[in-house]
Image (cartoon, rainbow, N blue to C red):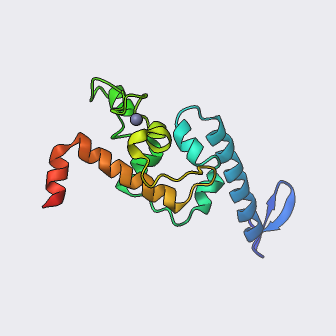
Amino acid sequence: MEKADNTIIHNGEIVTLKEARQIWAGDTLHKWEEEWDAHQLSRWTHFLFPTVQRRLDMKDLVPTFWSTQAITGHSVFRGYLKTRVRVDSESCPCGFGIESAEHVFRECIRHISGRPTDWEDLTMDHIRYMERITLNLWEEENPNFKTRRKR
Ligand SMILES: [Zn+2]
């Protein structure tokens, strides 16, 4: 209920609209954090962004075609492609596991060059590394894509 002086009654207390917006934003973020924490899929994305606030704080991260694939673990990784029946094998060409986003970016011996050593705090260096590797994988999986890019 809004009153003429730009205050409302929230949970039985009179608050300004500005205070109400802050309360609602806090409540919404709290609920979002709970849902994000409980969500059992997207564990790779959850590893990169353990909290919603962590993602909101990373204001330099503007999603691109490449970073979106890297962050979600979808698209070019054979572990994902196998679930879409796009490849016969989910094995990484390195021979040491399933080609998941986590394997490619943190473990795979094929993508050591430029790999960040510490993954505790995601930075734009991590994003740029993952974008570059994702592009490389696209070129491996789609020879026609590489040919078109070079023109
Ligand atoms: Zn590998």
Can I make out residue 18 in this image?
yes
| In-front residue for pair 47/14 | 47
Ligand 1 quadrant assignment: top left
Residue at the far right: name it: 13
Looking at the image, residue 97 lies above or below residue 151:
above
Q: Residue at x 55, y 65 (%)?
A: 59
Q: Residue at x 32, y 51 (%)?
A: 135
Left or right: where 39 falls relative to 9: left
Residue at the far top: name it: 88
Looking at the image, residue 12 lies above or below residue 50:
below
The x, y position of residue 134, in whole percent, is 36, 48
Q: Residue at x 37, y 55 (%)?
A: 132
| In-front residue for pair 40/121 | 121
Can I make out residue 1 in this image?
no
The x, y position of residue 45, in whole percent, is 53, 43
Q: Residue at x 65, y 39 (%)?
A: 37
The quarter of the image holding the C terminus is bottom left
Left or right: where 51 falls relative to 69: right
Left or right: where 137 falls relative to 96: left
Looking at the image, residue 70 lies above or below residue 124:
above
The x, y position of residue 20, in whole percent, is 75, 63
The quarter of the image holding the N terminus is bottom right
